[in-house]
Image: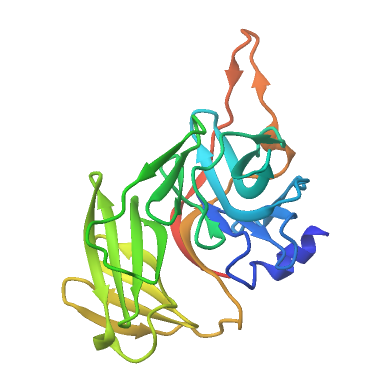
Amino acid sequence: MPLKTLYRTCVPRLPALPVASCNGLMLLSHYDVDKIWAIFNPVMQDFHEVSEFDYDSRLIGTGLGYCSASDDYKVVRIDEILRRGKIVYQTCVYSLRSGFWKVINDCPSDFPWLSPGVYLNGALYWRSWDFIIALDLETENYDKLPLPPDLGKPFETRVDAFGGCLILSCYYMMNRIDGWMMKDCEWVKLFTFGEGYGSGTRWNLRPVAYFKSKGQVFLLHDSGFFMLDIERNLAKNVTIDGLPEFFSCQFFPGSILPLDESYAVEVKSSAGTKRKRKKKTANKSFLRVL
């Protein structure tokens, strides 16, 4: 499938198809083909097509992250496969620098639904059934993080990363959403958004950005937005005119990283040491609506 088709589609129309972001780059997939992916730089309008995946499997997790140790961006996919009569969750990693896939350690658990991994500080995070799964992109090993205490029984949860912190959103049948932030390795409740903030269900309400200096959370609700002031316990509607019927909202720093063949080239000096390409990133951050 030509990359122009991916560009026109821009983002998957269904939430259960591969989509992720990291440092201003986005992982895209055509909405009806889960084996053709591309990394997209919205600022530079560049694409890098990820080589096609050949396994016959059921995709359950995706992710895009950066490894500072190898100065490399990595695409991760987790697939449910049958190995020697047992169901396992195979993890494969694609290196943007080398252009190849490799198989690493299996994921320790599956997920309640197909999940895009959340990138933060050299690791990818997914919400599993009873804990959060973390994949270190340098060691390519998994770890487990506990959930906040006394969560009750939310019917849905999701993981995000804002302001350098991991955020867990919990959705309850009583038309309420609680937001938790992991701070100094402990969970702290950030906000509660309930019936007092207007009509409409909360299950499709999603935090998009957290502004630490102002104590505000920017939330997406269906095709509209809310700005929640945590300290004042107030919320207001935010209108963005001209949005298309289908869109995805991502908050990330703009990047001027090229995605052409020059990324994969490592130049060796006369002394035989590797001279690493300097990464360039824009100074401004963008709230990207695609």
Q: Residue at x 24, y 73 (%)?
A: 192
x then y, percent, for residue 212 = 26, 60
Quarter of the picture holding the N terminus? bottom right
Residue at position x 36%, y 79% from top? 226
As drawn, the residue found furthest toward the right would be 1
User: Of residues 116 and 253, which is closer to you in this image?
Assistant: 116
Q: Which residue lies furthest to the top in this view?
A: 271
Residue 56 in sight here: yes
The part of the image, by quadrant, that contains residue 260 is: top right
Residue 58 spot, x, y in % from top left:
67, 55
Q: Is residue 88 left or right of residue 47?
A: left
260 sits to left or right of 125: right
**Relative to 150, 177 lies left or right:** right
Considering every residue shown, the one lying at the far bottom of the view is: 199
Residue 40, can we see it? Answer: no
Residue lying farthest to the front in this orientation: 85
Task: For the C terminus, give its image quadrant.
Answer: bottom right
Q: Is residue 244 above or below residue 218?
A: below
Depth check: 136 or 161 in front? Answer: 136
139 up-or-down from 38: above or below: above
Q: Where is residue 15 in the image (x, y as percent from the top left)?
A: 57, 69
- Where is residue 109 drawn, in percent x and y? 49, 48
| Residue at 36% from the left image edge and 57% from the top image edge | 162
Q: Which residue is drawn at 63% across and 63% down?
A: 17
Q: Which colour scheme is used?
A: rainbow
